Amino acid sequence: MDSKNYHNIILLYKIILIYGLCLVFSKAELPRFAHATKSDGSLILLVVGDWGRRGTFNQTEVAIQMANVGRLVDPDFIISTGDNFYEDGLTCVDDPAFEESFSNIYMGPEQWYSVLGNHDYRGDVLAQLDPILNQKDARWICLRSFIISTDVADLFLVDTTPFVDKYFTDPEDHTYDWRGVLPREEYLSNLLKENHVDIYVNGHDHSLEHISSSDSPLQFLTSGGGSKAWRQTIRPWNPQELKFYYDGQGFMTMALTENGVLFQFHDVLGNILHQWSGSKGFET
């Protein structure tokens, strides 16, 4: 495998994959953004999810530390794993929540690539996807699913909210905006394809997590600590697989080269809580 295709990284809203089986869009059907690496061939990014609360629940504090760490590591871009605007998405393209939860909170100049979460579907979902928001703030790019293509990695950003049955069968008191998704069966059938994936990143869980697959080099990472934490008991997990769990606010940095990967989880004070590195093929 050549170096360009070494790292296939899938950044998703919610983990729904069976261990050992990775499901992604066909590359030919997805919009693709080409992004240059650094002069030394490396790629550095920040990842945050579950954040948009008008600065409350420590969102502002996390944003400050993202900017501080950003000045040290010089990220090429930022990934949002979804749930961008609480509690019920945006009401329209002129919703002040866009400025109050995004433009006025995050200070760095980096491009943001975002996918949708279930809370985003409770508002006007097309507003978040509207290019008008990019005109309001050039850092903002949000699509349902797309690829960021670089010389060192292909990153698949996939909106997995439509995979979750209960949002259709038992929405409780919520109304979801499924425009562009229905008929659901057709949407999903056009979407799935087996692919080799090295790293799986998700949000939705309001925490920071690292799980290693027991039967493959695949690493599962959760970066959903952008604002309100859960502060709740989690299900017991195999300690051979669960390498790190933090029920609090924070974000993740990731550095990729032709030879390997390094990721670090940072808390609301910028402290490094956990880090992991792997060489090519993730033999550690």
Image (cartoon, rainbow, N blue to C red):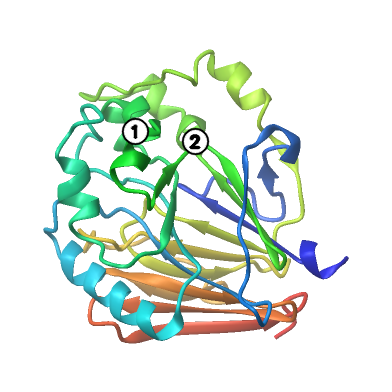
Viewer-proximal residue, 236 or 279?
279
Give the x, y percent position of residue 271: 31, 86
Residue 209, which numbered label?
A: none
The secondary structure type at the circle numbered 2 is loop
Tell me which label, 2 or 1, sits earlier in the chain: 1
Quarter holding the N terminus is bottom right
Q: CA distance from mark 2 to mark 1?
A: 16 Å
- Identity of the residue drawn at 38% across and 53% down: 139
How packed is label 1: few (under 14 Cα within 10 Å), some, or many (20 or more)? some
Pointer 2 residue: 144
The secondary structure type at the circle numbered 1 is helix
- Residue at far right of view: 1
Viewer-proximal residue, 189 or 123?
123
Give the x, y percent position of residue 71: 36, 81
Viewer-proximal residue, 216 or 143?
143
- Identity of the residue drawn at 42% across and 71% down: 252
Q: Is residue 179 left or right of residue 163?
A: left
Q: Amino acid at mark 2?
A: Arg
Q: Amino acid at mark 1?
A: Ile
Residue 18 to residue 121: above or below: below
Quadrant of the rendered image containing residue 240: bottom right
- Identity of the residue drawn at 47% across and 73% down: 75
Pointer 1 residue: 132
Give the x, y percent position of residue 194: 76, 43
Quadrant of the rendered image containing residue 123: top left
